[in-house]
Image (tube, coloured by chain):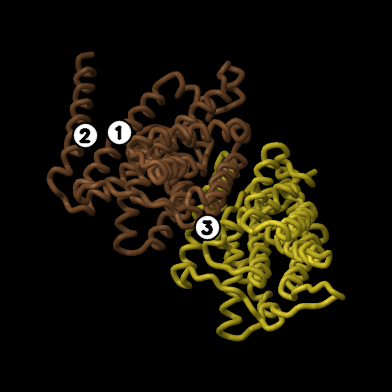
């Protein structure tokens, strides 16, 4: 238990946290802006991981190169899910509850379609560079998480830029702050919602690729990923991109520190218990506004 | 007046005849498959009815029902393994432990509303599953086995069939009685508008707590018997999140506002589910019930019974009429 070991654990935790942040940011966005609690969010992350995996295994396409394709595929599936499920559900009296239950259905369908066609075996994305490490003095940083982290930071920055510096992104924010006012100045709410939802699913897909570089994935892993998404989103405050990013890093460091001293399963128990405590005492999140 | 009384006697008569026929069904020596099929159907009826106390009447959708169910299963398994006590004797104790757990968890968690409540209840099940996976006293990831009853498999299945039939009937009748009582009216008032209910003098925290504990107690008893039925408990089996979702779907499919809905939904869907699982495959069955969940939420938020009735009286059913 040397100092460099502890620093290594913290660094790998922070890298992991960045990936959790990008996994969660789209989820918080749809929850905050559209009042759609999308349980099927992380099943699409697993779908992204699978697409990337097959492109890598069958066609030898590098996961980083196939990332734009995955974003496009998942944006389209997000748009389809929006048209088929989310749009009708948005008419319900309590949109959050209705969307939550309906997207539970979507998650079951997608998960089991994946496990029907691709079998429920665990898989891991292993391009050659993912298994080597960089050394900084005595501290080694493995490249898989590092690349995932860089992907995550790029994706979060892109999303932040989109929301604050593009016309559609500003429309999304306006709709979120005042739906009626936004409609009055001519913002097409349905189109804005479709783009928001599609982007959220696309960000999940990118996060899925990053996750696949670190962890083994299989269709039913989505339920555990969903809990992590909840953890990060609730800690960061629903709908805040920066808050989610910070929460991801915070939780990543907690995971890193705990993983250095505890067996991995107890880390999960600890984290979910932490989420329960936060839900009870500070449901608006630690970084919420 | 006389017609009404006659109608009531007819209903009771019909009920007794159906119950009697179900009761003597095993004596006809049907293939064991049918007994298992019906056993599972009764179990889901009981689970859906007990879930509906909270999920249907108050609108607090819990995905943690499976945690109480598993508490019951583990109680009987541990008592059988460590002390050799028959699960039929300890099933009630399983219910008691589940109720205690519900009281401890319910006190903080029932203050949360909507999605926050649902997620907390889901977390309860997940955290318990993770703990049980790593707790050696309850068999950790190996699980615990029961000693089988010293009788032939036919008699064994027959006993379980009758026990579960009794449980399902009793729980359904109790839930029906609750629905018609003042207690049930209070629960429904909470669903309609909790703040208004509070100002009308309804002690909503206490009522929710009672419903939550009662539902958990039932789930614990059912779990205790179910564990003995499959003769093996394992965290992956008893804490399966799909079971929670299936219970939810059954209630919503039948219509979660009355006691009839979960009864109908559980019978239909558990039979369909088991037939598909047996003859086609578990994945196909889950794909179908996932789709069904979406369809029910979008098109028939008050359940299929309400929807069909609406078709016949040509009354337009509005989308999202209830909370969902």
What percent of the width, then of the height, locates residue B111? 62, 32
Residue A134: in sight, yes or no? Answer: yes
Q: Residue at x 24, y 39 (%)?
A: B162
Whether the residues at callouts 2 and 1 have beta carbons within 8 Å, the answer is yes
What percent of the width, then of the height, locates residue A95? 59, 44
For label 1, the SS is helix
For label 3, the crowd category at 10 Å Cα-Cα, with few meaning under 14, some 14 to 19 and many 20 or more, is: many
Image quarter (top left, top right, bottom left or bottom right) of the N terminus of chain A: bottom right
Residue holding disc 2: B19
Query: Which sits in the foreground, A12 or A2?
Result: A2
For label 2, the SS is helix
How far apart, in angstroms, are the residues tagged by discs 2 and 1? Answer: 9 Å
Residue holding disc 3: A107
> Furthest residue to the right?
A137
For label 3, the SS is helix
Residue holding disc 1: B169
Q: Residue at x 63, y 62 (%)?
A: A201
Q: Quadrant of residue A72?
A: bottom right
Query: Which sits in the foreground, A5 or B230?
Result: A5
Instruction: Write down the colour of chain B.
Output: brown
Q: Residue at x 43, y 46 (%)?
A: B249
| Side of A283 relative to A98 (left or right) | right
């Amino acid at each position: 238990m040397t100092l460099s070991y502890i620093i290594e654990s913290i660094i790998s935790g922070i890298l992991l946290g960045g990936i959790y942040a990008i996994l969660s940011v789209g989820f918080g966005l749809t929850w905050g802006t559209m009042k759609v609690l999308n349980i099927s969010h992380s099943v699409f992350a697993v779908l992204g991981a699978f697409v990337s995996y097959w492109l890598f295994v069958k066609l030898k396409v590098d996961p980083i190169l196939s990332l734009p394709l995955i974003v496009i595929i998942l944006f389209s599936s997000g748009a389809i899910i929006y048209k088929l499920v989310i749009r009708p559900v948005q008419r319900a009296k309590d949109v959050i509850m209705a969307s939550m239950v309906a997207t539970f259905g979507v998650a079951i369908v997608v998960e089991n379609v994946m496990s029907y066609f691709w079998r429920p075996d665990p898989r891991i994305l292993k391009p050659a560079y993912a298994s080597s490490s960089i050394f900084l003095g005595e501290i080694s940083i493995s490249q898989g998480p590092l690349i995932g982290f860089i992907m995550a930071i790029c994706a979060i920055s892109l999303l932040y830029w989109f929301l604050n510096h593009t016309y559609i992104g500003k429309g999304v924010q306006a709709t979120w702050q005042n739906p009626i006012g936004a409609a009055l100045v001519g913002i097409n709410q349905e189109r804005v919602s479709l783009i928001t939802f599609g982007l959220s699913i696309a960000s999940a897909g990118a996060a899925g690729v990053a996750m696949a570089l670190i962890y083994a994935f299989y269709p039913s892993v989505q339920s555990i990923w969903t809990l992590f998404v909840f953890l990060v989103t609730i800690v960061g405050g629903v709908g805040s991109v920066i808050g989610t990013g910070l929460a991801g890093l915070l939780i990543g460091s907690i995971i890193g520190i705990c993983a250095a001293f505890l067996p991995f399963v107890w880390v999960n128990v600890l984290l979910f218990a932490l989420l329960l405590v936060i839900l009870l005492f500070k449901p608006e999140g630690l970084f919420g506004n | 007046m006389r017609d009404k009384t006659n109608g009531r006697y007819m209903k009771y008569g019909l009920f007794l005849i159906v119950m009697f026929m179900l009761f003597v069904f095993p004596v006809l020596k049907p293939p064991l498959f049918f007994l298992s099929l019906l056993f599972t159907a009764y179990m889901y009826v009981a689970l859906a009815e007990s879930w509906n106390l909270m999920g249907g009447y108050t609108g607090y959708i819990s995905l943690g029902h499976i945690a109480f169910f598993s508490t019951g299963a583990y109680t009987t398994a541990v008592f059988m393994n460590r002390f050799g006590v028959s699960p039929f004797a300890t099933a009630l104790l399983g219910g008691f432990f589940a109720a205690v757990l519900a009281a401890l968890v319910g006190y903080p968690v029932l203050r949360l509303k909507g999605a926050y409540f649902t997620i907390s209840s889901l977390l309860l099940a997940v955290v318990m599953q993770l703990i049980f996976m790593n707790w050696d006293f309850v068999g950790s990831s190996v699980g615990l086995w029961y000693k089988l009853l010293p009788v032939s498999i036919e008699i064994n299945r027959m006993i379980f069939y009758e026990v579960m039939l009794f449980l399902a009937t009793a729980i359904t009748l109790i839930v029906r009685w609750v629905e018609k009582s003042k207690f049930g009216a209070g629960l429904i008032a909470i669903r309609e508008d909790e703040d208004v209910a509070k100002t009308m003098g309804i002690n909503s925290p206490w009522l929710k707590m009672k419903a939550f504990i009662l539902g958990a107690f039932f789930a614990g008893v059912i779990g205790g018997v179910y564990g003995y039925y499959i003769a093996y408990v394992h965290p992956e089996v008893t804490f399966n999140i799909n079971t929670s979702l299936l219970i939810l779907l059954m209630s919503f499919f039948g219509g979660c506002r009355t006691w009839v809905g979960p009864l109908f939904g559980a019978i239909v869907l558990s039979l369909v589910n088991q037939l598909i699982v047996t003859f086609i495959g578990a994945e196909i069955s889950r794909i179908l019930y996932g789709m069904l969940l979406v369809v029910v939420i979008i098109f028939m938020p008050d359940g299929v019974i309400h929807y069909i009735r609406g078709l016949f009286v040509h009354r337009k059913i509005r989308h999202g009429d209830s909370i969902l």
